[in-house]
Amino acid sequence: MLRTTIFFLFGCSFFFGQTNGIPIVNLKDGTKTTSTSGEGSGSQGSGISTSLQQQELINEINELKVYMNQSNLSMSMSQQDKKFNGYRIYDISGNLKREQVVSATNSYTVDISNLSSGNYLVIVTETLSNTGVSKLFIKPQ
């Protein structure tokens, strides 16, 4: 049975929803990101596949961890046993703030000193499957 629930977050232009038990985030650029837990997600492009194999892949890659240093000027991202080759940072309104392609790695640091204080979503692209993994973070004042 297909169940869909939509939540609007602070009047922003992307929404969190749930299709067949998998939460969804839709961004302004048309990206749909799914998550099976609050710890990460996998992007499915313009369509959502909920096959068992796809769900296992999403569970497998949702180990994204985001840390901010004490000066709150940089962010480090790492994924156990996975490599990624790029990232995108969106503000709470779904506007793309930064995008970069990087050499395949499992961790790197991003300078966020020019971002205003607020809530952001970072999406990294997993190298082998070309799937997106996301995490929300807050940049304090």
Image (spheres, rainbow, N blue to C red):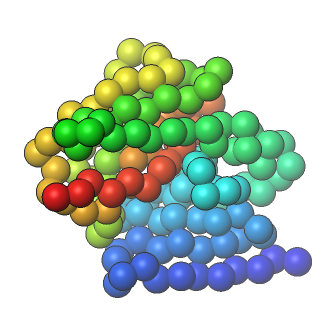
72 lies above or below 128: below
112 lies above or below 139: above
Numbered marks: total: 0
Of all residues shown, which one is farthest toward the left? Answer: 114
Left or right of 101: which side holds 82?
right
Quarter holding residue 140: bottom left
Left or right of 6: which side holds 9?
left
Query: Which residue is depicted at the point 37% across and 24% down?
Result: 108
Left or right of 76: which side holds 99?
left
Query: Which residue is depicted at the point 44% across and 41% down?
Result: 66
Q: Position of residue 128 (x, y in %)?
A: 61, 23
Q: Is residue 127 visible?
A: no
Q: Position of residue 131 (x, y in %)?
A: 57, 38
92 lies above or below 49: below
63 lies above or below 40: above
Who is closer to the viewer here, 109 or 90? 109
Left or right of 120: which side holds 104?
right
Of all residues shown, which one is farthest toward the front? Answer: 70
Query: Which residue is depicted at the point 66% across and 72% down?
Result: 18
Could you tell me which quadrant the C terminus lies in? bottom left
Q: Position of residue 43 (x, y in %)?
A: 56, 49
Who is closer to the viewer here, 22 or 32? 22
Query: Which residue is depicted at the point 50% across and 21% down?
Result: 106
Q: Position of residue 116 (x, y in %)?
A: 15, 57
Could you tell me which quadrant the N terminus lies in? bottom right
Q: Is residue 5 visible?
A: yes
